[in-house]
Amino acid sequence: MVPHSRKHTTILPGKFVRNFGHTLIVAPHADDESLGCGGLIALLSKYRQPVHLLLVSDGTLSHPNSKEYPAEKLRDLREYEFKKAAAILGVTGDQLIFTRYKDRSVPHEDSPGFQKAVDNIDGILSQLRPASIFVPWRRDPHPDHRATWQIFNKANRGGARLYEYPIWLQQLGDEPDLPTNEEVDVLKIDISPVLEIKQKAIAAHQSQLTDLISDDPAGFRLSPDMLDQFNVPYEMFFTAKK
């Protein structure tokens, strides 16, 4: 569910990522980094740009009824899959950051823990000093995605440019969720040379794709339609108009 005009935005070559400099990719959940920014991350690695990945939530509500995978074990599995996907994309070790906010309870701007979360992110940003930060689209239809944007929008970014990527917008978004031509510019980047790498990174998240966790019938799984949405030779980002 993306405005028709967005479909005709010029697609920039992959080498454009060199303009981002030191980049921080922020994923509310393990798999968002691969779905929304997998091609970007692979290109940043290809062109030897410094990059860090930050996983915001603990991911423990993807299968809340599983006895085989109680919360702590599920968190460890989700983080293992995140590390595996990141390694496929060329990011390892201390380039990975975990804040472990409770799944579906990432502090939003009206919650008591919001300022503490902002302060936490301020500390991380003051150490990393990125030039570019990628976060979910501000009105992406998931509470953790919106809360993540709110935290980074409020944080002291030290001049870093904020880019926003959609995850659930096309599948679940309503008209008011869509970006308008008045509020954002659209950036599309050609990821065709690294699309296969992106797909391998997505496949690393087996708990979200298969019956790996088989004892929770209500457990989350990415649908084929959702996966098809991210099997395209470009990635799209929004930047707020100045």
Image (cartoon, rainbow, N blue to C red):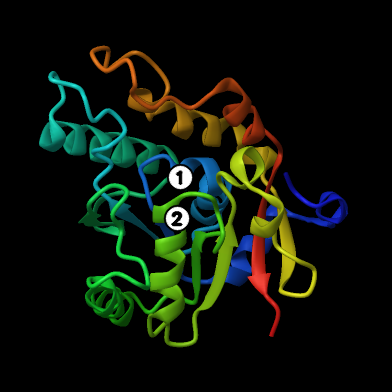
Amino acid type assigned to the residue bearing label 2 in the image? His
Q: Where does residue 61 sit, x and y in percent of width and height?
A: 27, 37
* Callout 2: SS: helix
User: Which residue is at 30% across, 58% downward?
Assistant: 106
Q: Examine the image and state in which quarter residue 183 appears.
A: bottom right
Q: How many marks?
A: 2
Looking at the image, is mark 2 or mark 1 earlier in the sequence?
Answer: 1
Towards the viewer: 231 or 172: 172
Q: Where does residue 195 sit, x and y in percent of width and height?
A: 62, 35
User: Which residue is at 34% across, 21% downward?
Assistant: 218
Q: Is residue 86 visible?
A: yes
* Callout 1: SS: helix
User: Which residue is at 63% across, 25% downward?
Assistant: 225
Cβ atoms at labels 2 and 1 below 8 Å apart: yes
Q: Which residue is mark 2?
A: 145
Q: Which residue is mark 1?
A: 32
Q: Where does residue 164 sit, x and y in percent of width and height?
A: 57, 62
Q: Is residue 24 visible?
A: no
Towards the viewer: 77 or 142: 142
Q: Residues within 10 Å of mark 2 (few under 14, many from 20)?
A: many
Towards the viewer: 203 or 181: 181
The quarter of the picture where the N terminus appears is: top right
User: Which residue is at 43% across, 70% downward?
Assistant: 150
The quarter of the picture where the C terminus appears is: bottom right
Query: In the visual, does 46 lie left or right of 77?
Result: right
- Mark closer to the observer (2, 1): 2
Which labelled disc corresponds to residue 95?
none
